[in-house]
Image (cartoon, grey):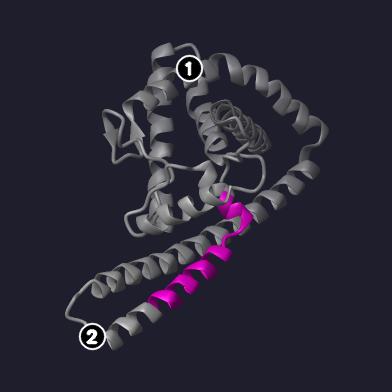
Amino acid sequence: MYYYYFYSFIIYSFIGWITEVLYHFYKLKNFVNRGFLYGPVCPIYGGTAVLLIYLLSPFSNNILVLFAGGVFIASIIEYITGYAMEKLFNAKWWDYSDEKFNIKGYICLKFSFIWGIMSLIFIKYVNPLVSNITYFVMNNFGEILYNIILVLLISDVVVTINGLVTFRKLFIELQEVISEKAENLQKLNLTSLNNDIKDEISERLRVLHEIKERLYNRITVRQRHLLKAFPHISSNKFQQALEDLIRKINNNN
């Protein structure tokens, strides 16, 4: 059963990625890679699907259990993922704070209800069909394809995490520059300062501007894509840096 769950995870991660891309293509009229990883997968979909299969398949004839179980499982995964991402990278990648009955912006009643309906449909109708594909892949490609996909997936995760850690450091540096710039601008407006001090502050502002431009130049293509893929990303620690960088990217497009 391990291979079945592994291939199910990959297949549903890919289906989830396609769903996200098509939805945002419909809304934005352009292609956006909505995944955290470089590859065409959204692991949160694959992980949720595997848990639903494992926990709810025995209750496939009980509609109430399928719905309630789907609400609970999907909401827990979404909450844990959102919480962990914010703690690790000091950024909230999605935010339901504007929705009614939300919990810290990570989950909300409306989407939990939708997850419940989708989980019911998934267990009763979707997974029985997709399982045919899963078993076909298992029986014809088995361990060889498994090893290839596993190596690619682990490599992708390692590279992505390293990139996000680097991204976080850049935001911290940019936030420090923005804060120092704001402090110096306030000082510059003080009428009690003599011209020499004003000249020193002006020179420091010029240096800060250069540092800021160098930080902009460190942004990779992938990091630009992440900001486009998650336009509502927010952070308590470097919100100004986020807004400044998103504005800079939008102005260059």
Local crowd size for mark 2, using a 10 Å CA cut-off: few (<14), some (14–19), many (≥20): few
Q: Is residue 227 left or right of residue 103?
A: right
**Element assignment for label 2:** loop
Q: Position of residue 2 (x, y in %)?
A: 64, 38
Q: Position of residue 176 (x, y in %)?
A: 37, 69
- Report the front residue among 90 and 75: 90
Q: Residue at x 51, y 61 (%)?
A: 167
Does the magenta portion include 69? no
Q: Residue at x 66, y 40 (%)?
A: 40
Q: Position of residue 188 (x, y in %)?
A: 27, 74
Q: Amino acid at mark 1?
A: Leu
Q: Which residue is mark 1?
A: 120
Q: Is residue 119 left or right of residue 111?
A: right
Magenta range is: 204-224
Query: Outermost residue toward the left?
Result: 192
**Quarter of the image where the N terminus is located:** top right
| Residue 59 in sight | no
Residue 114, picture quadrant: top left
Q: Residue at x 29, y 33 (%)?
A: 102
Q: Is residue 147 above or below residue 108?
A: below
Does the magenta portion include 220? yes
